[in-house]
Image (tube, rainbow, N blue to C red):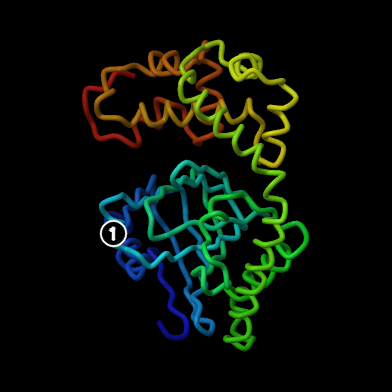
């Protein structure tokens, strides 16, 4: 790819926008599935800066995933470093999950199975990197972690990448700014890596928490107290584990329950289940409360969301 390439679904027929986005904006990176949630109007500007590709992306609510079959045989180990400017993206890869919000950044392996979804318009800057670009043996230990761009090398990285991916980046020496972003990415990762020992024990506990939630998410009495009792730890320590996260444990439990309900509402095999049945099955005890927090999260009531995102069928509302 030479110079700058811009992609937009604005002038593409509505029914063909997701396919256009997959085939043009993502084709050079491999095979992916795009799941648009509504009128999919997205734009992407890709620039070549020296030996690197940077991108500026603006997209509405949608999902993107790569399956094991789609990733099979792809050994490029190409990582995408993302700086989030607007909206929140929920990313999952292997056993890790992050919710990327404005002011933070992360990186993930584009050549391995992953999935993300966003329920609101998002805007981000990104650069594609390999471990050798940063003179590191492997980027996997740094992948799918939430990094704050508030200070240190992360702050400089965020500013440099935003400039490189913007129109202002055209005024910079392309090779120089590409190398600068890569150097800052290396320094930022090493800066965060110096705290790895402190974070390791918390990450082990975080994995234990996620396992406990997997087993007990449907229980109506699931709470910070029950998690602390089940894992034989203090509530104070649970709060510490989530201190560097973008949500509290209570908010995390609510988000996981809402996402489970959302998937159930869209599941063709669950069309005979009412909204009430689904809500109660995932631990909600009040339909009014469930409807209110669901609408806050996804922009529509559970019934309206199900109607808008499923084909006409004999669905129990």
Q: Image check: 76 left or right of 212? A: left
Q: Is residue 13 visible?
A: no
- Determine the residue positioned at 57% across, 55% down: 142
Q: 167 or 41: which is nearer to us? A: 167
- Could you say where residue 274 lies in the image, as x and y percent from the top left? 34, 16
Q: Position of residue 155 (x, y in %)?
A: 73, 63
Q: Which residue is mark 1?
A: 19
**Residue 273 occupies quadrant:** top left
Q: Please, is residue 38 above or below residue 223 in the view?
A: below
Residue at (32, 67) in percent of width and height: 27
Q: Residue at x 53, y 69 (%)?
A: 127
Residue at image x 69%, y 67%? 187
Residue 103 position (above or below residue 207): below
At numbered mark 1, what does the secondary structure look like: helix, strand or loop? helix
Left or right relative to 113: residue 141: right
Instruction: Check the image and name the residue furthest to the bottom.
Output: 173
**Number of numbered callouts drawn:** 1
Quadrant in the rendering for residue 182: bottom right
Residue 290 spot, x, y in % from top left? 52, 20
């Amino acid at each position: 790819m030479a110079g700058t390439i811009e992609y937009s679904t604005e002038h593409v027929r509505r029914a063909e926008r997701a396919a256009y986005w997959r085939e043009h904006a993502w084709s050079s990176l491999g095979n992916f599935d795009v799941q648009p949630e509504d009128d999919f109007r997205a734009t992407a500007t890709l620039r070549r800066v020296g030996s690197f590709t940077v991108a500026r992306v603006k997209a509405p609510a949608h999902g993107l995933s790569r399956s094991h079959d789609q990733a099979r045989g792809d050994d490029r180990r190409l990582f995408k470093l993302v700086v989030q400017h607007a909206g929140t993206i929920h990313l999952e890869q292997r056993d890790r999950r992050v919710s990327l919000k404005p002011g933070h950044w992360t990186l993930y392996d584009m050549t391995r199975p992953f999935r993300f979804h966003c329920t609101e318009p998002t805007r981000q800057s990104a650069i594609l990197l390999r471990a050798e670009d940063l003179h590191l043996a492997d980027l996997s230990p740094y992948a799918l972690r939430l990094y704050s761009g508030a200070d240190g090398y992360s702050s400089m990285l965020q500013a440099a990448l935003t400039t490189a991916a913007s129109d202002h980046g055209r005024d910079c020496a392309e090779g120089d700014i590409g190398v600068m972003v890569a150097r800052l990415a290396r320094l930022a990762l090493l800066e965060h890596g110096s705290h790895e020992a402190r974070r390791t024990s918390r990450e082990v506990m975080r994995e234990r928490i996620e396992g406990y939630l997997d087993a007990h998410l449907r229980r109506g009495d699931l709470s910070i107290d029950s998690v602390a009792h089940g894992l034989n730890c203090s509530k104070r320590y649970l709060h510490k584990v989530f201190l560097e996260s973008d949500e509290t444990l209570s908010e995390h439990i609510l988000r996981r329950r809402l996402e489970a309900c959302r998937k159930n509402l869209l599941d063709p095999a669950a069309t005979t289940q009412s909204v009430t049945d689904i809500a109660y099955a995932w631990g909600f005890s009040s339909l009014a409360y469930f409807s209110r927090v669901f609408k806050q999260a996804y922009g529509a009531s559970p019934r309206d969301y199900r109607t808008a995102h499923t084909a006409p069928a004999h669905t129990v509302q």
